[in-house]
Image: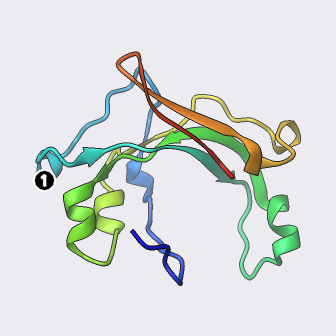
Amino acid sequence: MAIPTVPTLFIKPATAVADPYPGKIVVPKVAQDGSSDYEGELTVIIGKTGKDIKEEDAYDYVLGYTSGNDVSARNAQFATSQWCYSKGLDYSAPIGPVLVSPKAIPDPHTLDIRSIHNGNVVQTTNTK
């Protein structure tokens, strides 16, 4: 896909948050077409409300970091220009189990991320 000229935004509603491993990921019937996919990601936990926050103040709102698995239904994702449906399915965002203080990670743009499925490394990336 081409890099978009404007940010692609999608929601992860509270109903999407799920327990970390060994919790089960429940793939809803609508997404049981073989297109379910995963992405290991850095998850940023926001600790206080805000609006129109200056860029230089953004990190003051971060409570901490944890790992996340962004489970998506790819067929639904690419069927429309709105990704909310495919990215916001119930229990499609297992996170945790550890919350790491921002003091322990001074630069979250330098972290390596590895996803493991059934004992096999299936994704190696970083936050750069």
Q: Is residue 113 above or below residue 128?
A: above
Q: Is residue 91 above or below residue 1?
A: above
Q: Residue at x 58, y 37 (%)?
A: 67
101 relative to 75 in the view: left or right: right
Give the SS element for disc 1: helix
Horizontal and vertical percent position of residue 124: 53, 36
Q: Quadrant of the N terminus?
A: bottom left
Horizontal and vertical percent position of residue 27: 22, 41
Q: Is residue 4 above or below residue 103?
A: below
Q: Looking at the image, what colour scheme do you see?
A: rainbow
Label 1 sits on residue: 30
Horizontal and vertical percent position of residue 17: 44, 46
Q: Residue at x 66, y 50 (%)?
A: 45
Q: Is residue 52 above or below residue 43?
A: below
Horizontal and vertical percent position of residue 101: 80, 39
67 relative to 83 in the view: left or right: right
**Given the image, on which type of amino acid does mark 1 rest?**
Val
Mark 1 surroundings within 10 Å by alpha-carbon count, few (fewer than 14), some (14 through 19), many (20 or more): few
Choose top left, top right, bottom left or bottom right for residue 118: top left
Q: Residue at x 88, y 41 (%)?
A: 103
